[in-house]
Image (cartoon, rainbow, N blue to C red):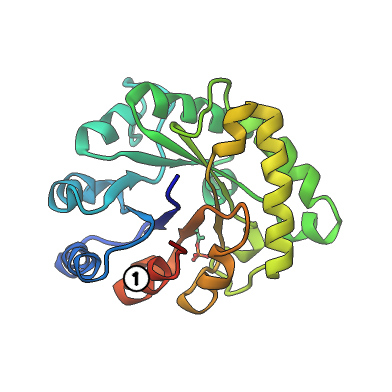
Amino acid sequence: MRSLVAGNWKMNGAGEADLAKFGALKTALAETPPSCDVLVCPPATMIAQAAWFTKGVFAIGGQDCHAQPSGAFTGDISAEMLKAAGASHVIVGHSERRQYHGEKDADVAAKAQAAWRAGLIAIICIGETLEEREGGSANSICHSQVLGSIPDGATAANSVLAYEPVWAIGTGKTPSVDDIAAMHAHLRGCLKERCGEEGGKMLILYGGSVKPDNAAAILSLPDVGGALVGGASLKVADFMGIISAAPA
Ligand code: PEP
């Protein structure tokens, strides 16, 4: 399975200059064909336009979805709506959703099921806080998040796991490569426990302050199947630097 480098624009991007980034990324990918799959998750307002414009070159995804297909949920967006707009993936359980919207593992699992129902690939995020890492419970926290956030029926085709230590997101700090390798090996075991044989094949992305200068070291680690990139995905040159670092 090819690795995946996914950009999460979060709540950034609205104007012409942001739309122009899709054209610039398309051109850059045509000049330097990637050895990984590429996905950008812009704000929901940009998905339809982006998906139409980038079709066949790179994929477009949502950053969150509601568990229900439709209904009286003001301000929410369903997986079916993302699919209709042209998305192929949706991020669920990002730590910012868990932190600012109180989402628990069961909510994340319901959203992953909604993603599958709509025909989307769910990028299911987990990760420990700094307190948990320093207290020595990172492995057990991530184990319980894997068991609680991944629904029955997860396969390597319908799901991707993203390990994002909360303390590494947007901070410029990353775990050491040894720590990333150790956690990804641990997560591989958790995935096999949760999903059986499919868990052995599922991509595990690393996320948290991935930049062009640390991407090669991280992406070449065993069981690292790609990266989920926040800040650096907003600059086409930086995002391309990460994409180019993906091993063939
Ligand atoms: C993220 O928000 O998923 C993320 C990894 O952000 P950053 O790359 O900016 O740390």
- Residue shown at 33% from the left, 34% from the top: 77
- Residue shown at 28% from the left, 48% from the top: 59
Task: Specify whether 243 is left or right of 59.
Answer: right
- Residue shown at 41% from the left, 30% from the top: 66
- Please say whether residue 128 is visible from this viewpoint: no
The quarter of the rendered structure image containing the C terminus is: bottom left
Task: Specify whether 188 is left or right of 89.
Answer: right
Instruction: Work out whether 14 lies above or below 83.
Output: below
The three-letter code of the residue at mark 1 reads Met
Frontmost residue, 197 versus 130: 197
Tell which residue pokes out farthest to the right in this image. 135
SS type, badge 1: helix
Tell which residue pokes out farthest to the front in this image. 248
Q: How many marks?
A: 1
Q: Is mark 1 within 8 Å of ligand 1?
A: no
- Residue shown at 50% from the left, 34% from the top: 156
Q: Position of residue 2 (x, y in %)?
A: 42, 49
Instruction: Work out whether 137 lies above or below 193.
Output: below
Question: Which residue is labeled 1 in the image?
Answer: 240
Task: Specify whether 222 is left or right of 40.
Answer: right
Tell which residue pokes out farthest to the bottom in this image. 213
Residue 61 placement: quadrant: top left
Q: Residues within 10 Å of mark 1 (few under 14, many from 20)?
A: many
Residue 174 placement: quadrant: bottom right
Q: Position of residue 164 (x, y in %)?
A: 60, 55
Q: Position of residue 155 (x, y in %)?
A: 51, 29
